[in-house]
C-alpha cells in the first residue's frame, strides 16, 4: 500500500479507524479501491473531483441550515471516496435497522390504535398528546397493511471500540433519499 496516498492521513489510537487496522495497515475491504486509486494519475483524480463539484453545482444540489435566519442554501458536499462497510457488518447493520424501523412502526400502530403502551404507562400521555405532530383525528383509522411509517433512515456512527451506534432516527422528510440518489449518479459518472 503506497504511503503517498496516505501522506496526510491522521492516524490515531483514540478512535476507531475505518481505513487502517494499524500503522499503514489498510483494512482488507479497502484494498480494491486503493488499488484503483494507485493506478490513477493525480491530475486525473483532480479532474474527477472538479467534475464532481461542477455536476453538483449544475444540478442545483443544495441544502439549507434550518437554524440559519438568512435561509442561505449551500452546495451539497460529497466525498469522492465512499465509506466501505464489509458485507458481514452491513448484514448486521441492515438487519438491526430493519428491526428498528419495524419497532417504530409498531409504536405508531399502537399510538393510533389500541394505545396499550399509554394504558400500561410505557409512554407518557403528555409526550403523545402534547406533540404537535400527533394527528388526533387519525386515532382509530385503519391504514393499508398497518404501515404507518413510510420513510425511515438512521444516522450511524462508530463507537471508539468499533461498534455501530444509531445517533438519530429520521422519519419525516424524504430529502435523504434524493441526496443518496444524486450521490450515486455523480460518483458513477466520474468513475465510469
Image: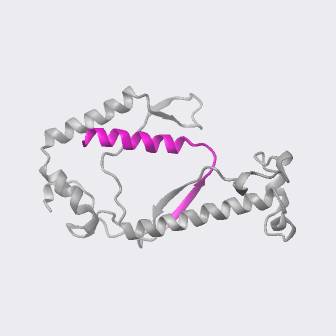
- Of residue 45 and residue 13, the one placed in the foreground of this image is 45
Q: Residue at x 66, y 53 (%)?
A: 149
Residue beneath the point at 19% across and 42% down:
45
Q: Residue at x 46, y 61 (%)?
A: 157
Instruction: Please state, as top left, top right, bottom left or bottom right, where the C terminus lies in the image.
Output: top left
Residue 184: image location, x then y, percent = 38, 44
Nearest the viewer among 79 and 136 is 136
Q: Is residue 79 above or below residue 27?
A: above
In percent of width and height, residue 101 lies at 61, 60
Residue 160 placement: quadrant: bottom left
Q: How is colour applied across the structure in the image?
A: one colour
For residue 182: magenta?
Answer: yes
- Asked if residue 134 lies left or right of residue 75, the reply is right
* Numbered disc total: 0
Which quadrant: the N terminus? bottom left
Residue 7 in sight: no
Instruction: Judge left or right: residue 60 versus residue 107.
Output: left
Q: Is residue 171 magenta?
A: yes
Report which quarter residue 115 is drawn in: bottom right
Q: Is residue 63 visible?
A: yes
Please state if 169 lies on the left or on the right of 138 as rendered. Answer: left
The magenta span reads: 165-192
**As drawn, 53 above or below 144:** above
Depth check, front residue: 88 or 133: 88
Measured as percent of width and height from the top left, residue 42 is found at 14, 43
Amino acid at each position: 500500500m503506497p504511503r503517498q496516498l496516505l501522506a496526510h492521513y491522521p492516524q490515531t489510537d483514540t478512535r476507531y479507524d475505518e481505513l487502517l487496522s494499524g500503522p499503514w495497515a489498510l483494512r482488507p475491504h479497502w484494498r480494491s479501491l486503493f488499488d484503483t486509486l494507485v493506478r490513477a494519475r493525480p491530475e486525473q483524480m483532480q479532474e474527477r473531483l472538479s467534475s464532481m463539484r461542477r455536476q453538483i453545482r449544475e444540478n442545483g444540489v443544495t441544502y439549507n441550515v434550518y437554524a440559519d435566519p438568512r435561509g442561505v442554501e449551500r452546495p451539497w458536499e460529497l466525498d469522492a471516496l465512499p465509506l466501505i462497510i464489509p458485507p458481514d457488518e452491513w448484514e448486521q447493520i441492515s438487519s438491526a435497522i430493519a428491526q428498528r424501523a419495524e419497532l417504530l412502526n409498531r409504536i405508531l400502530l399502537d399510538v393510533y390504535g389500541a394505545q396499550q403502551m399509554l394504558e400500561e404507562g410505557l409512554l407518557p400521555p403528555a409526550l403523545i398528546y402534547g406533540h404537535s405532530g400527533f394527528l388526533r383525528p387519525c386515532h382509530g383509522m385503519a391504514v393499508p397493511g398497518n404501515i404507518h411509517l413510510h420513510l425511515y433512515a438512521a444516522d450511524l456512527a462508530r463507537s471508539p471500540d468499533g461498534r455501530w451506534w444509531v445517533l438519530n432516527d429520521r422519519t419525516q422528510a424524504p430529502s435523504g433519499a434524493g441526496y443518496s440518489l444524486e450521490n450515486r449518479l455523480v460518483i458513477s459518472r466520474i468513475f465510469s
